[in-house]
Structures are given as structure tokens and as C-alpha cells.
Image: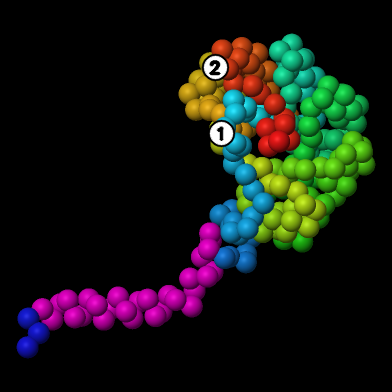
Amino acid sequence: MNKNPYLRTLVFLLVLLSLLIYPYINQFPGVSAQENSYYYMPKDAPIYWSGPTNKKAIALTFDDGPDPIYTPKILAVLAKYNVKATFFLVGEQTQRNLALVKKILAAGHEIGSHTMTHPDSNNSTLLLLEKEVLESVRLLERLSQQKIKYMRPPYGQLSPAYFAACQAQGITMIVWSIDSNDWREPPVDKMVEQVISQVQPGSIILLHDGGGTRQNTVDALDQLLPLLKQMKLEPMTLSQMYE
């Protein structure tokens, strides 16, 4: 005689539930979703959030430019401290500011793709997103006469279309390990604290030279670079960090 009929009922319900949801497991975001999802990430995805930790190197990365007002100011601060960085450029902004792209490259910085128009992947088709990457890469390679190695998805949205485009072009997708939150336009001291409190060897720091008012980013950068030097952390391009 079963002394615990409730246990038998519970086991039966759990088995039934597992049978009902099993056919849909592979559709869950983060497993093997085929739809456009922020959380989608194939196991073999060419994507990095950070760099190697075996050397005192970090990467400063700037999104949404080039901007005619703030990119020159950021370049001036980087030059002041003899620091190299990686700029993820939006194609439309690039076409409007070709001279700035040449200035970025002439200063020894690296450029990467940030798509053509900075779309929200949740409101775009997969075909359109793939086209956004490919057109941006072609534009930047034509201007720089260099192979584009890196792409950053707008808003950090990990769409399968971005993975497909990057894999087809042999490009690595770069996200970040530290968000400076400069896109929120916080006070300079808050931005500096946000970075310094988290930074460590291999950190990839998200900053912006376009897409809004970035004077606080310029001022924060001028404070950050001496502090990073005191911590014996050397900012460099992504390619230099991954060497």
C-alpha cells in the first residue's frame, strides 16, 4: 500500500510536464533559438566580452562616431597621454565625416564596424541586419585599406544575423566587460568611479564619442587615463591586446 499518494501524484505531474515542454526546449532563447533574440548566442559564436588577463592591458572602445564635435576632443585627450583605442564607427556617420575617419587612422587607432545605421535588432529583419554589417565592413575597408577585424552590435543585441555576417567575413564580435554608462550622461566623477571600481587586466571598456552629448565622456577620459597609468594598466587597441 502506498503510504504517500501525494508523492506519486507529484511525480506523475512532473513527468507529464516534462513531456509537454520537451519539444519546445530548443526554441528557448540562449539554447538554440532561430529567431531574432537579444539573448541568442551559438556555442561557436566569435564573440568576446574581455581580453587576456596575463598582461596588464585593457581596451578603450568608443561607439557611435565619428562625431564632428566630440571625436576630435577624444582624439586630443588620447594623444595627450599617448594612448591608442578602438573606434566602432556607424556607417552613416562615417560617410558624413570622412576626414575624421582618416584622422582616427592617422593617429594609430583601430576602427571596427558598428553597422550602417545603428538599428534596433528587435525591430529589424535578419536579412536587414546582415546587410547592415556587410555594407559597413565594405565601407570601412575601402576607406582604411585594411581588413576590418571587429564588429560591435548596437545596444549589445546578439542577433543571429550579426553572428552569420561576422562568421562569413571572419570578423570577431566584441561586446564589453565594463559599461561606463556614459550614454546616460552621468556626472564625470560617477563615470570615472564606474570604470575604476571594476577595471582589471583584459577589461574592455565601453565609451561613446557620438550618439549624444559626450563632453562628460571627454572630461572623464582626461581623468581616467592618469588613474589607469597609476594602476599600471596600459590602454591599447583590441588587436594589440589580443596579440
- Determine the image quadrant of residue 152: top right
From this viewpoint, is residue 208 visible?
A: no
- Determine the image quadrant of residue 216: top right
Q: Is residue 77 left or right of residue 223?
A: right
Relative to 70, does residue 145 appear above or below in the rendering?
below
- Pinpoint residue 123: horizontal percent, then vertical percent: 67, 55
Q: Crowding at label 1, few (<14), some or many (≥20) Cα neighbours within 10 Å? A: few
From this viewpoint, is residue 167 visible?
A: yes
The answer to the question of whether label 1 and label 2 lie on touching residues, with beta carbons closer than 8 A, is: no
Q: Which mark is residue 231?
A: 2
Q: Which mark is residue 53?
A: 1
Chief secondary structure of the magenta portion? helix
Relative to 119, does residue 101 appear above or below in the rendering?
above
**Magenta region, residue range:** 4-31
Q: Is residue 174 magenta?
A: no
- Residue drawn 57% across and 32% down? 54
Q: Which mark is residue 145?
A: none
Q: Is residue 19 left or right of residue 90?
A: left
**Dot 2 lies on which element?**
loop
- Residue drawn 68% across and 18% down? 218
* Kind of residue at badge 2: Met
- Residue drawn 48% across and 78% down? 23
Q: CA distance from mark 1 to mark 2?
A: 15 Å
- Residue drawn 77% across and 61% down? 127
* Kind of residue at badge 1: Thr
Q: Nearer the viewer, residue 12 or 126?
A: 12
Q: Is residue 197 left or right of residue 152?
A: left
Q: Crowding at label 2, few (<14), some or many (≥20) Cα neighbours within 10 Å? A: few
Q: Is residue 25 magenta?
A: yes
